[in-house]
Amino acid sequence: MSDRPAKQKLWGGRFTGKTDPLMHEFNQSLKYDQRMHTADIRGSIAYAKALTRVGILTKEEETKMIEGLEAVEREWTIGQFKAEPDDEDIHTANERRLSQLIGSEIGGKLHTGRSRNDQVATDMRLWLLDEVEDIQASLKALIRVIIERADKERDILLPGYTHLQRGQPIRWSHFLLSHALSFRYDLERLQQLIPRISVLPLGSGALAGNPFAVDREFLAKELGFKSLAENSMWGVGDRDFIAEFLMWASLTMTHMSRISEDLIIYSTAEFGFVTLSDAYSTGSSIMPQKKNPDSLELLRGKSGRIFGHMAGFMMTLKGLPSTYNKDLQEDKEPLFDAVDNISASLKIAEGVIATMEVYGDKMRQALTMDVLATDLADYLVRKGVPFRETHHVSGRAVASAEARRCQLNDLNVDDYKKLHPKFDDDVVQVFDFEASVERRMAIGGPSRKTLDRQISVLRAALQ
Ligand code: ARG
């Protein structure tokens, strides 16, 4: 690699020795931070304008500077930016190219009062704000797809599970919406991050602020930031917005993993509740019959990877001295990878859920009468018996059916009367799954009415 004298580097004035070739490479972030080129150029254009306002640049110099920066951006967008060996990162690369294009007489003035420390913190925030917009849109699309299915498939009943054991009957829509609600709060949390990402560090300098009195409020306005870093040391050293984003992504992916796990289980032949469309499945290289839910498995797997980025980056931050330290360059790869993977995950999940086949008959078959044991106890409650007693009585009915290898509705009314005198002929009405679900009409339950409410509350949250 470069065996060039360090003095040729952007910061090389005080250096006489050479940079070790491996160190040169080790230090270089351009290969991954070049994806922030637009944010970097936008920040520089705003900064050039701010410099003109305090008399560092003339109006003509500003115009030349902006034209030059726009030309550099064009080279990036058409894939014609040519990196040079001493381009350490996106900031040095853009500045080097700017001076080549417009001459260092003017180009050399851009960095007046600015440091890569306030520059990189600004770029990261600008870049992430754009990504968060896209992620928000994808998350909303995912929630919408879940709501649409729930809206259409409300007739389908299945057992709800606790401990993966059949518990009580629910509507399939109720299951779907339980996951939509997790994502709805993820959306809210993501939106709450925005004001803390949208804090402008530019004008903080290296650490001690800007000596040319640049108008930071003007800079914030130009770049669309909601507020200013009120302390320059904090401005260059803070990466909490990245940690918070990674925490958000970890929790959102945890929800992704849980719905995936449910659907993986439901797609087994043993359950047979759903099958994924071919578009989101893969086959086995040896077992011809296989259709594997790889999409869901990857969603579940990616949650570990993203949690890892969060935990790793927290360790990077822990124990750092104040302000900028080069450790902070390690914020980029975890953030970029988390953004890429969560963006893809949201889109894949949307596709999986939109296209999977649902088998209502299979779900119905899984509804054995024992999932009405709670309803049986509730029947006696309605006749004035304390629940603790009715729970016991219903348990004895379950045991008795089990001993006779029959279902709860195969016991006759006399059997029930022997179990408790308050049982009557109308006990047969308990053995109706639809009625059981419809009784659960307290807000939050699976009845048709409360389902309507869930759907409208979720739709409102997306507005
Ligand atoms: N590439 C660096 C980073 O990502 C930019 C800031 C460099 N600042 C410095 N003082 N070396 O963190």
Image (cartoon, grey):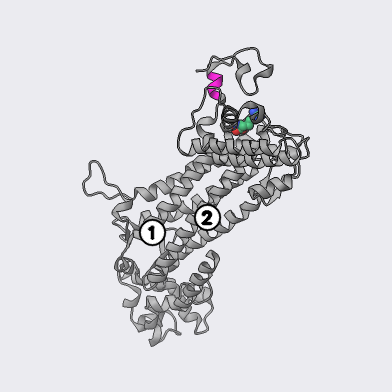
User: Residue 347 appears at what percent x and percent y?
Assistant: 43, 53
User: Residue 214 appears at what percent x and percent y?
Assistant: 75, 40
- Mark drawn on residue 422: none
Structural crowding at the residue carrying mark 2, measured as other residues with C-alpha within 10 Å and reported as few (<14), some (14–19) or many (≥20):
some
Is 25 magenta? The answer is yes
| 47 lies above or below 266 | above
Rendered image quadrant of residue 362: bottom left
| 61 lies above or below 176 | above
Say which amino acid is labelled 2.
Answer: Gln
* Image quadrant in which the C terminus is located: bottom right
Residue situated in front as seen by the camera: 141 or 270: 141
Q: Quadrant of ligand 1?
A: top right
- Residue pictured at 61% horizontal, 44% vertical: 125
Extreme front residue here?
60
User: Residue 322 appears at what percent x and percent y?
Assistant: 72, 34
**Badge 1 element:** helix
User: Residue 6 appears at what percent x and percent y?
Assistant: 61, 17
Residue situated in front as seen by the camera: 443 or 298: 298
Extreme bottom residue here?
425
Residue at which label 1 appears: 353
The magenta span reads 22-26
- The reply, left or right, for residue 435 in relation to residue 246 is left
| 362 lies above or below 335 | below
- Mark drawn on residue 136: 2
- Residue pictured at 38% horizontal, 87% vertical: 425
Rendered image quadrant of residue 87: top right
Say which amino acid is labelled 1.
Answer: Ile
- Residue pictured at 44% horizontal, 84% vertical: 421
**Badge 2 element:** helix
